[in-house]
Amino acid sequence: MSIDQRLLRGPGPLLDSSGELADVGWAREPLLDCNLENAAFYGLRFLQPLRIKRWDYYGITTPTHFFSFTVSDVGYLGSIFAYAVEFASGRYHEETLTVPLARGVRLPRGSQQGESVYDNGRVRLHFSAAADHRRVAVRWPGFGGQELSAEAILHLTPGHDSMVIVIPIPKKRFYYNRKVNCMPAEGSLTCFGQNFTLDPATCLGNLDWGRGVWAYNSFWVWASASGFLPDQRTIGLNLGFGFGDTSAATENAFILNGRLHKLGEVKFSYDSKHFTRPWGMRSADGRLDLEFTPFFERVAKTDAKILLSEVHQMFGRYNGTAVTDEGERIEIRDLIGFAEEHHARW
């Protein structure tokens, strides 16, 4: 099935010599060099690094839990956080470190290789990327009064599609994003006083890699899932809307056994005063029709004066249908994932 959205040409630079986006659209793999040194949205160029946002967010979904680890640099602050959710009980814990001027935060130029590191001598997060896998290593003593540690490999086989998007935001601002769903996860993890073995037959990882410059007041909605169909094919969701100009391309897609099936506009229906009520997500062309029923609400608020963030992230189950590019109708039943609304001043 064809879609009227622009494919990135690539390879090439993200920004031209004047700081404008060299291309806009979507792709199945990261094609553009993230040359943030060309950003030119302030007259005083030395101030620009204070508004450039960069993050690497990893999630691991197991049959019983969701674990998440992030290293980020929002320009004037670093934000290092981890959280864990136990599905059956609603047990949840989250901790965040806010680091002035992002001291000690190291993030790579691109998403294909390199290391993302934060280490203050006590807490250490170390992510590394190679051609066929990602490594997530975490040590966080005293996390919820106990230890959080992880040593995980997320497999990324050649040809496994990503959802890559480049969109403009007014006044020479922009967003370059890569989402990867359904990476088989293996290794070990300790949290809540329990030791977990990550089995790639049941555990999947996801990546949200973001780089760009936003308006100070921003808003977005993001929905994601990585799981399995009854026939053991992997199924992933990446849906969203909010900031930026998505006329060239949206970030909406589902990923079946590593192959991305691109969607156009998806309409969300939900009650922002009662997030725990069911959400609807339906594409304009009828290829996606989902109901999301939350069972847990994670609320994360940060107020660092110049930076304000409020997230309502709902964990729940997706039910409905999706139609592939070839016309196969996929039945989605009780797929665990999340959907969130995020307001930020940053």
Image (cartoon, rainbow, N blue to C red):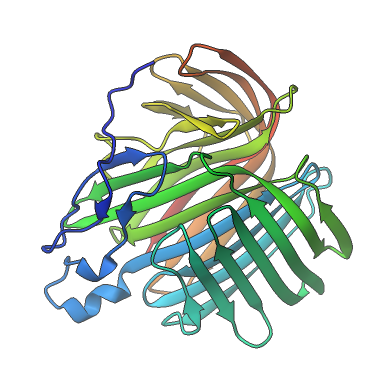
Residue 257 drawn above or below residue 186: above
How far across and down, in percent of the image, does residue 219 sit?
Answer: 38, 49
Work out which quarter of the rendered image holds the C terminus and state it. bottom left
Q: Residue furthest right?
A: 194
Give the number of callouts.
Answer: 0
32 or 5: nearer the viewer? 32
252 or 181: nearer the viewer? 181
| Residue 273 visible | no
| Residue 216 visible | yes
How far across and down, in percent of the image, does residue 338 sit?
Answer: 61, 41
Residue displayed at 23% across by 48% down: 168
Residue 346 drawn above or below residue 48: above
Displayed quadrant of residue 305: bottom left
How far across and down, in percent of the image, does residue 87 sit?
Answer: 78, 44
Relative placement, left or right, of 221 versus 312 is left
Residue displayed at 64% across by 62% down: 135
Residue displayed at 32% across by 61% down: 34
Residue 208 drawn above or below residue 302: above
